[in-house]
Image (cartoon, rainbow, N blue to C red):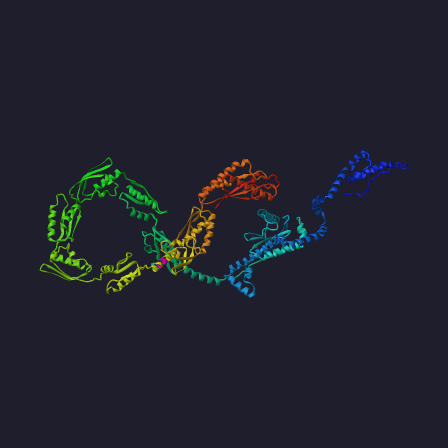
C-alpha cells in the first residue's frame, strides 16, 4: 500500500509566547505518534528528529501489541490466498450463527443456479442422490404388493375345494367381486389390540392406545424394548438410518412397524391381518406428521403438546374383522363318508394284494443268492427282475404259502455269481478239489480250510483266495498244515499199506532217498501211480516188490473173470467176502465154473455159482432175436428153428449194426445161423441225421442234433448252404423226422453287419440310464439317437466286442437325469456327502439309508427325500437314527466351560491367558479328530463379549474384535481355521449382571466363550 501523504517538514519558528507551549516538542511528539501508527510510511519522516526515547518506551508499552496485530491484518489483506484460508476457517461458524431466513434468501439464488447447471451437465448425479431415498420406498411397496398377492393366492387355494369355498364362489358371482377378495373377506380374522407412537430421536413413548379387553405391561417399558431392538438390528447388521424392522411375529401376535420422519408407529395385531392394513397404518402415521410435525421433532417427553394424536391412533385400534358362524355341513359330510368307504374298500383290496406281493418279495430278498433290482405291479400283474445265482433256490418254489397267483407273476432273472459264503464254498470245493485231509467250512461269514495238504494244493488255495472278488468272504487257509517230505513219505507208505494186494515189508529214509520193499499182487494198484498227489519225488523212491497172488476177494474175482470169460448174461460180484455168480449160462460154462470153485486155494473166498441158471439153445436164440428187434434200422420179418438150425430174414439199414456182431456173448453157434437181409433206408432220426451230415457237409459253425425226434440245425452259415439245407428238408420222405434250420443264422456280409448292429442296439437298450428313441441303417451306415444319463456307461464303450465299425456309427444323445436307483444313489452321495457311519443301498427299488448321523445331516436328507418323492423315488430314512455322541459330551462340556478373559478396552488377552489358550487349542483339536472318526464335522463358535462401559456400538465392535483375535491365536496353535466361526455379542449376553452406574464394568463379562456345534 502506498500513501499520498507529503513529506513533513518542521518550521523553525520560535514558539509563541502567548501560550507558553513548546510547539517544536509538540510537533516531534505528533511525528513520533504517526511513525508508530503507520510504520510503512517511515520514509515520510526522514529528516524529522526522533522524539524522546522515553516516548518510544511508552509507545511499546501502550500500543505495541495493537501495532503488531494491525500490521499482521494489513499483511493478511494484501495476500488473497491467506485471506481465503482465514475466511474459510470462520465461515462455518458464521453460517451456523446467521439468521435462517436471511441466510436462505442470500444463498437460494446461488444454490439454485449451481444445482441447475450440475443437473444439466450430468443428470446421473441427481439420480445417484435420489436413488437411496426412492429405492427402499419402491422396494417396500412392491414387497407389500407381492405379500398381498401371495396371501390372496394361499387363502384361495386353501378354501377352493371346501364347502365354504363353494358358497364364497357363489357370493363372488352374485356381488361381482373377485373370488380372492371374498375369500380374504371371510377368512382373515384379526384385531388391532395396541398402537404405540414412539419418538425416533429419543425412543420415548409419545402415545399409546389399546383396545377393550386387551392386556399389556407398562407401555413405556414396551416402547423402550422396541427401540432397543431397532437399535440392535441397525448396529449389528449396519442398516441405514431410515430403515428398521417391518414385521415381528410371535404366536398369534404380529407387530407391524411403520417408520416416519420423526416417529415410528407400531401396531400389535392378533390374528391374520390383510396386507392392505399396512396402507391404513401408514396413512395414520402420515396424517400425524402433517398435523404435528414440529411438535414431533421437538418432543422431549411432554405429550401435552400433541393433543390430537390419540384420536388418530384410536382409528387403528378400531380395525378388526370377526368370522361369521356357519351351520354344520351334514350333506357334505355324508357324501365324503360314502366316498371314503368306497375308497377304503378299494384301498384295502389293493393293500392286501400289495401286502401279499411284498411278503413274497421279502422271502425272495431273504434268500441268499437272489438280488431284486426292480419290481412293480402293473395292470393287476406282478413283475420282478433281478439277479440269481444258479446255486440259489428257485424263485417259483417260494410262491406257495404267499397266496400270490403264479400265473400273474412275470419274472426276469439274470444269472450271476453270488458272494454269499455258502455259494463261494461250493465253487471252491469244485475248483480246488481239496484232499480228504482238508475240510472246508463257513465260520462267521468266513470260509475256513483246516487239515493237512501239500504245498501245491496250499499254493492253489492261496491263489484262489487272492482271486476272490472284493467284498466277498475271506478265504482263511491258515488252518491248513503243510506236511514235510518225511511226513509226505509216511503218508505215501500209509496209503500203500491200506491198498489191497500190497504188503509193505520194510521202508526207511537214507540220505534223502526213500527205500521200500514188500509183496505185490500183479492185479493190485501200481505203487508208482499212487505217488501222484503225494508230492514225493519219484526219482528219490527205490522200490523192490515180489509178486504173489493175493486171496483178497476183488483179486480172485478178476482172475475168475479172466479165466472163465462169463457170458453177458452172467454177473460176478463180491458179497460179504464171497464171490457170487448170478444169471443164465450154458452147461459147459457152468461146468468150468464148478471146476474153478474147487481149485480155489484153501483160505481163499468162496465161489458161489448157485445163482447161475442153465439155458437151452432155443432160449439163447430167442434172446438173440429180441436183441435184433431192439436195434434201430433192423426189422425182423421171420425167424424159426428147424433140425437144430436157426433161420432169420428181414430188413436192415446199411448204417445199422451188423447182426453177426450181436451173436457175441449169446452162446449161439454162428455156424448154425442162416440169415437173409434186404437193405432199406430207415427213417429213424439218427440214420437221417447221418445221411444229412454226409450230403450237406455242414460248416464247422453249424451243429446238427436230434431234439425230441426232430433234427435241428444251429449255428452260422452262408446263404448258399442254407438254401441247400432247405432243399434237403423238402426232400425228406413223408413220415420222416422234421429238419428244422430256423436257428441257423445267415452270415453273409450285409446280414452279418445288420445282425451285429441289432446286437449293439439290444446291449444299449439293456443298459440302465440309456433310452434308445430311434435307430436305423442307411447307405451302409448306422444312425441312433436317444437319451443318456451322464452317469451311464459310454455308448462308444459298448461297441467293443460287437464287430460294428465305430466309424460307421452316427449317434446323437441328449443328456437327462435317470431315476434309476443306482444313479440317484450316486447323486445323493455327491450332494449329501454322508458320514462314514451312514450307508446308502438299494433294496427292492427303494433307496434305504442305514446308520447314524447328526441332526443337521438328517434334516438335509429329509429335504432330499421330499424332493425325490415328487419324482416317484423313495428315499427310506426309517433306519437312520441320530448319532449318539455320549462319548464326546464330556469333552464338549469342558470346552464350553472355558472362557478367555480380557482387560478393559483391550482386544488382545493378557499373558496370563496363554495356558488357557494352549489347553483350549488341544481340546478343540482332540474334539475335531474324535468327531471326524464318528463321521461328523465339528464347528466351534467363538462369541466375543464386553462389559457395559462405553457406547453400545463400540462394545459390539470390541466384542467382535476379541473373537477374531482368539481365532487367530487358536489358528497359530494348530486349530483348523475353517472349523472356527466368530460373532460379537456386545453386552447382550453377560455372564453376570452389571450395575448401570459402574464405570469399570465387570471383568467376568469381558471374555470370549466357545460353543460346539456338530454337523
Q: Is residue 533 visible?
A: yes
* Magenta span contains residue 309: no
Residue 405 in the figure: left or right of residue 281? left
Q: Mainly helix, strand or loop, the magenta region?
A: helix
The percent position of residue 988, horizontal first and vertical second, equals 57, 44
The percent position of residue 986, horizontal first and vertical second, equals 57, 43
Q: Please name whichever residue, 313 or 926, is drawn nearer the observer in this view of the structure.
A: 926
Q: Please name whichever residue, 26 or 340, is drawn nearer the observer in this view of the structure.
A: 26
Q: Does 274 appear above or below 545?
A: below
- Rendered image quadrant of residue 984: top right
Residue 190 in the figure: left or right of residue 655? right
Residue 709 in the figure: left or right of residue 628? right
The percent position of residue 642, horizontal first and vertical second, equals 10, 61
The percent position of residue 82, horizontal first and vertical second, equals 71, 43
Q: Residue furthest right?
A: 18
Q: Bounds of the magenta span?
A: 754-758
- Rendered image quadrant of residue 906: top right
Q: Does 328 appear above or below 52?
A: below
Residue 579 in the figure: left or right of residue 275? left
Image quadrant where one finds the N terminus: top right
Q: Please name whichever residue, 956 or 721, is drawn nearer the observer in this view of the structure.
A: 721
Q: Is residue 444 visible?
A: no
Q: Please name whichever residue, 783 or 193, is drawn nearer the observer in this view of the structure.
A: 783
Q: Does 450 appear above or below 242?
A: above
Marks counted in the figure total 0
- The residue at the point 27 percent across, 44 percent down is 435
Amino acid at each position: 500500500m502506498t500513501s499520498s501523504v507529503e513529506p513533513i517538514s518542521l518550521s523553525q519558528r520560535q514558539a509563541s509566547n502567548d501560550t507558553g507551549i513548546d510547539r517544536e516538542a509538540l510537533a516531534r511528539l505528533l511525528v513520533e505518534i504517526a511513525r508508530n501508527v503507520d510504520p510503512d510510511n517511515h520514509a515520510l519522516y526522514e529528516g524529522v528528529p526522533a522524539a524522546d526515547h522515553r516516548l518510544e518506551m511508552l509507545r511499546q508499552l501502550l500500543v505495541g501489541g495493537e501495532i503488531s496485530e494491525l500490521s499482521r491484518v494489513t499483511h493478511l489483506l494484501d495476500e488473497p490466498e491467506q485471506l481465503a484460508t482465514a475466511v474459510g476457517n470462520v465461515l462455518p461458524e458464521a453460517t451456523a450463527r446467521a439468521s435462517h431466513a436471511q441466510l436462505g434468501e442470500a444463498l437460494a439464488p446461488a444454490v439454485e443456479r449451481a444445482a441447475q447447471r450440475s443437473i444439466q451437465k450430468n443428470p446421473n448425479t441427481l439420480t445417484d442422490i435420489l436413488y437411496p431415498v426412492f429405492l427402499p420406498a419402491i422396494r417396500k411397496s412392491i414387497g407389500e404388493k407381492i405379500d398381498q398377492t401371495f396371501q390372496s393366492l394361499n387363502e384361495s387355494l386353501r378354501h377352493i375345494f371346501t364347502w365354504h369355498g363353494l358358497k364364497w364362489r357363489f357370493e363372488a358371482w352374485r356381488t361381482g367381486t373377485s373370488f380372492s377378495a371374498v375369500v380374504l373377506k371371510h377368512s382373515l380374522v384379526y384385531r388391532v389390540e395396541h398402537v404405540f407412537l414412539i419418538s425416533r430421536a429419543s425412543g420415548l413413548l409419545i402415545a399409546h392406545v389399546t383396545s377393550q379387553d386387551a392386556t399389556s405391561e407398562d407401555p413405556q417399558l414396551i416402547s423402550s424394548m422396541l427401540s432397543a431392538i431397532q437399535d440392535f438390528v441397525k448396529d449389528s447388521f449396519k442398516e441405514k438410518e431410515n430403515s428398521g424392522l417391518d414385521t415381528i411375529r410371535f404366536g398369534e401376535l404380529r407387530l407391524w412397524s411403520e417408520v416416519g420422519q420423526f416417529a415410528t408407529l407400531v401396531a400389535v395385531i392378533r390374528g391374520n391381518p390383510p396386507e392392505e392394513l399396512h396402507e391404513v397404518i401408514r396413512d395414520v402415521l402420515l396424517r400425524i406428521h402433517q398435523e404435528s410435525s414440529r411438535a414431533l421433532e421437538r418432543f422431549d417427553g411432554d405429550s401435552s403438546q400433541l393433543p390430537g394424536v390419540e384420536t388418530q391412533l384410536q382409528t387403528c385400534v378400531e380395525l378388526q374383522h370377526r368370522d361369521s358362524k356357519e351351520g354344520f355341513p351334514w350333506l357334505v359330510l355324508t357324501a365324503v363318508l360314502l366316498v371314503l368307504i368306497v375308497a377304503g374298500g378299494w384301498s384295502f383290496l389293493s393293500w392286501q394284494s400289495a401286502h401279499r406281493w411284498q411278503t413274497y418279495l421279502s422271502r425272495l430278498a431273504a434268500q441268499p443268492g437272489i438280488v431284486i433290482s426292480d419290481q412293480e405291479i402293473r395292470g393287476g400283474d406282478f413283475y420282478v427282475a433281478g439277479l440269481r445265482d444258479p446255486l440259489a433256490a428257485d424263485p417259483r418254489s417260494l410262491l406257495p404259502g404267499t397266496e400270490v397267483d403264479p400265473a400273474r407273476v412275470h419274472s426276469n432273472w439274470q444269472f450271476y455269481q453270488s458272494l454269499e459264503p455258502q455259494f463261494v464254498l461250493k465253487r471252491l470245493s469244485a475248483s480246488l478239489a481239496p484232499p480228504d485231509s482238508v475240510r472246508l467250512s463257513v465260520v462267521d461269514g468266513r470260509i475256513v480250510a483246516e487239515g493237512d495238504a501239500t504245498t501245491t494244493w496250499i499254493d492253489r488255495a492261496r491263489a484262489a483266495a487272492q482271486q476272490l472278488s472284493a467284498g466277498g468272504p475271506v478265504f482263511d487257509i491258515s488252518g491248513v498244515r503243510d506236511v514235510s517230505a518225511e511226513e509226505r513219505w509216511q503218508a505215501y507208505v500209509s496209503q500203500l499199506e491200506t491198498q489191497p494186494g500190497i504188503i509193505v515189508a520194510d521202508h526207511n529214509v537214507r540220505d534223502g532217498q526213500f527205500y521200500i520193499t514188500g509183496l505185490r499182487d500183479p492185479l493190485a494198484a501200481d505203487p508208482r501211480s499212487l505217488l501222484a498227489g503225494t508230492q514225493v519225488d519219484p526219482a528219490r523212491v527205490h522200490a523192490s516188490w515180489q509178486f504173489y497172488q493175493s486171496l483178497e476177494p476183488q483179486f480172485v474175482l478178476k482172475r475168475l473173470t479172466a479165466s472163465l470169460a462169463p457170458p453177458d448174461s452172467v454177473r460176478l460180484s463180491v458179497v460179504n467176502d464171497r464171490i457170487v455168480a448170478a444169471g443164465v449160462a450154458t452147461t459147459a460154462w457152468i461146468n468150468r465154473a464148478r471146476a474153478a470153485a474147487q481149485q480155489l486155494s484153501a483160505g481163499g473166498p468162496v465161489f458161489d455159482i448157485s445163482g447161475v441158471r442153465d439155458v437151452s439153445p432155443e432160449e439163447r436164440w430167442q434172446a438173440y432175436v429180441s436183441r435184433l428187434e431192439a436195434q434201430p434200422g433192423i426189422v425182423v420179418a421171420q425167424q424159426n428153428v428147424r433140425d437144430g438150425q436157426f433161420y432169420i430174414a428181414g430188413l436192415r439199414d446199411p448204417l445199422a449194426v451188423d447182426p453177426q456182431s450181436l451173436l457175441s456173448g449169446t452162446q449161439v453157434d454162428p455156424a448154425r445161423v442162416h440169415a437173409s437181409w434186404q437193405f432199406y433206408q430207415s427213417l429213424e432220426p439218427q440214420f437221417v441225421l447221418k445221411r444229412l451230415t454226409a450230403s450237406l457237409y455242414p460248416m464247422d459253425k453249424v451243429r446238427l442234433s436230434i431234439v425230441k425226434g426232430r433234427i435241428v440245425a444251429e449255428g452260422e452259415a452262408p446263404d448258399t448252404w442254407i438254401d441247400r439245407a432247405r432243399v434237403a428238408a423238402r426232400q425228406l420222405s413223408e413220415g420222416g423226422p422234421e429238419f428244422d434250420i430256423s436257428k441257423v443264422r445267415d452270415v453273409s456280409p450285409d446280414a452279418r453287419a445288420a445282425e451285429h448292429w441289432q446286437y449293439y442296439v439290444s446291449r444299449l437298450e439293456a443298459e440302465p440310464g440309456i433310452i434308445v428313441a430311434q435307430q436305423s441303417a442307411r447307405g451302409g451306415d448306422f444312425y441312433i439317437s436317444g437319451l443318456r444319463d451322464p452317469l451311464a456307461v459310454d455308448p462308444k464303450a459298448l461297441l467293443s466286442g460287437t464287430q460294428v465299425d465305430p466309424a460307421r456309427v452316427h449317434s446323437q444323445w441328449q443328456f437327462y437325469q435317470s431315476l434309476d436307483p443306482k444313479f440317484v444313489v450316486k447323486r445323493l452321495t455327491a450332494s449329501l456327502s454322508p458320514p462314514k457311519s451312514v450307508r446308502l443301498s438299494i433294496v427292492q427299488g427303494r433307496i434305504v439309508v442305514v446308520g447314524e448321523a447328526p441332526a443337521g445331516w438328517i434334516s438335509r436328507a429329509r429335504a432330499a427325500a421330499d424332493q425325490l418323492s415328487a419324482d416317484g423315488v423313495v428315499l427310506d430314512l426309517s433306519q437312520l437314527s441320530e448319532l449318539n455322541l455320549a462319548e464326546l459330551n464330556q469333552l464338549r462340556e469342558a470346552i464350553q466351560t472355558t472362557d478367555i478373559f480380557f482387560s478393559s478396552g483391550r482386544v488382545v488377552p493378557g499373558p496370563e491367558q496363554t495356558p488357557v489358550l494352549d489347553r483350549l487349542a488341544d481340546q478343540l483339536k482332540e474334539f475335531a479328530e474324535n468327531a471326524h472318526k464318528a463321521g461328523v464335522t465339528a464347528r466351534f463358535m467363538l462369541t466375543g463379549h464386553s462389559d457395559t462401559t462405553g457406547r453400545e456400538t463400540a462394545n459390539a465392535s470390541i466384542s467382535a474384535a476379541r473373537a477374531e483375535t482368539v481365532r487367530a491365536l487358536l489358528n497359530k496353535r494348530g486349530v483348523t481355521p475353517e472349523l472356527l466361526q466368530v460373532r460379537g455379542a456386545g453386552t447382550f449376553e453377560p455372564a453376570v449382571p452389571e450395575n448401570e452406574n459402574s464405570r469399570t464394568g465387570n471383568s467376568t463379562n469381558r471374555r470370549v466363550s466357545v460353543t460346539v456345534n456338530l454337523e
